């Protein structure tokens, strides 16, 4: 997702929220933002809208989306249609929310008025897991087959047309578009690899280039900051790894829990990083030097 926001707009939207950064902020030091058990162990898909509200799936029960307007201030946003369970969330320029509905092989769309519809459906998907969005509204979805240890990547046009771009990959999970929309990053959880694909003008993908190989632990959701650095949730390691656009490990941010599932940027300046934590059913947060690309794109 690339939520197309100006920083000024985000600050206006946050005027009534509690997520303004404290004057004593410490960079890269994680704290609890939402306490244990507020969400289920299926918590995933953090994303921040133009008002500065944070969303994540599975608030209190599976098949829901919760909204967080400040520290320990979470509530129900919507219940998804019966049988649907969400994973990744992204927003488009119009404020529409897109959710990977992995149980029904759908990409759902929720308008700002909370109207829910199936935006795209593909029965041959294993289970759409995480999604990324380009500036033109094109969605990219990871599609792991956990039992088989393999996965796919799909492209969903701004009109809902679905096309498989890559097959026979490892267990595809985290997915993100670079700030300039020229590179798609896709990680493989079990294989512990991140691949980079050049994106053509038509939205097609070039050959896979190995971006980074980890030695241990799983990989989950990813986001980029305004400088193109990639933030990777390291499932089981209890950390977020930050990689440069050249594939150099810049730092790791230690978390309180061991099982981060995804990351998103928000806060008054866009530098607050929210991390959803499986098993805890919680959200942690830390501050980065740089704002997320989603909140600084014009």
Image (cartoon, grey):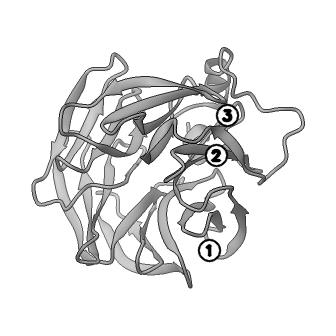
Can residue 246 be seen in this snapshot? yes
**166 left or right of 73?**
left
Mark 2, other Cα within 10 Å: few <14 / some 14–19 / many ≥20? many
Q: Residue at x 57, y 55 (%)?
A: 224
Can residue 271 be seen in this snapshot? no
**For discs 2 and 3, the disc positioned in front in the rendered view:** 2
Mark 3, other Cα within 10 Å: few <14 / some 14–19 / many ≥20? many
Q: Residue at x 59, y 62 (%)?
A: 258
**231 left or right of 79?**
right
Q: Identify residue for label 2.
A: 284
Q: Is residue 243 above or below residue 7?
A: below
Q: Residue at x 41, y 24 (%)?
A: 77
Placement of the C terminus among the 4 image quadrants: top right
Q: Identify residue for label 3.
A: 267
- 99 vs 205, nearest the viewer: 99
**129 left or right of 165?**
right
Instruction: Check if mark 1's residue and mark 2's residue have beta carbons within 8 Å.
Output: no
Q: Identify residue for label 1.
A: 246
Which callout, 1 or 2, points at the residue further toward the start of the chain? 1
């Amino acid at each position: 997702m690339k939520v197309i926001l100006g920083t000024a707009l985000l600050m206006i939207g946050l005027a009534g929220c509690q997520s303004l950064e404290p004057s004593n902020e410490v960079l890269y030091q994680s704290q609890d933002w939402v306490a244990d058990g507020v969400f289920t162990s299926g918590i995933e898909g953090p994303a921040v809208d133009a008002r500065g509200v944070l969303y994540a799936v599975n608030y209190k029960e599976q098949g829901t989306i919760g909204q967080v307007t400040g520290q320990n201030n979470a509530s129900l946003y919507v219940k998804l249609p019966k049988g649907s369970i969400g994973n990744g969330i992204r927003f488009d320029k119009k404020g529409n929310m897109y959710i990977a509905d992995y149980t029904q092989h759908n990409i759902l769309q929720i308008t700002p008025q909370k109207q829910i519809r199936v935006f795209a459906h593909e029965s041959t998907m294993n289970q759409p897991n995480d999604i990324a969005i380009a500036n033109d509204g094109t969605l990219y979805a990871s599609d792991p087959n956990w039992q088989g240890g393999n996965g796919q990547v799909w492209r969903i046009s701004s009109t809902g047309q679905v096309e498989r771009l890559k097959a026979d990959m490892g267990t595809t999970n985290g997915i993100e578009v670079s700030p300039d929309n020229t590179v798609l990053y896709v990680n493989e959880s079990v294989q512990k690899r991140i691949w980079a694909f050049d994106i053509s003008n038509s939205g097609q993908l070039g050959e896979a280039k190995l971006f980074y190989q980890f030695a241990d632990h799983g990989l989950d959701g990813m986001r980029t900051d305004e400088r193109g650095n990639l933030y990777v949730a390291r499932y089981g390691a209890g950390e977020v790894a930050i990689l440069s656009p050249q594939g150099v490990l810049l730092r790791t941010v230690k978390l309180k829990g061991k099982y981060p599932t995804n990351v998103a940027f928000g806060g008054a300046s866009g530098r607050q990083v929210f991390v959803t934590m499986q098993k805890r059913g919680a959200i942690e947060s830390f501050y980065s030097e740089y704002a997320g690309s989603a909140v600084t794109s014009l």
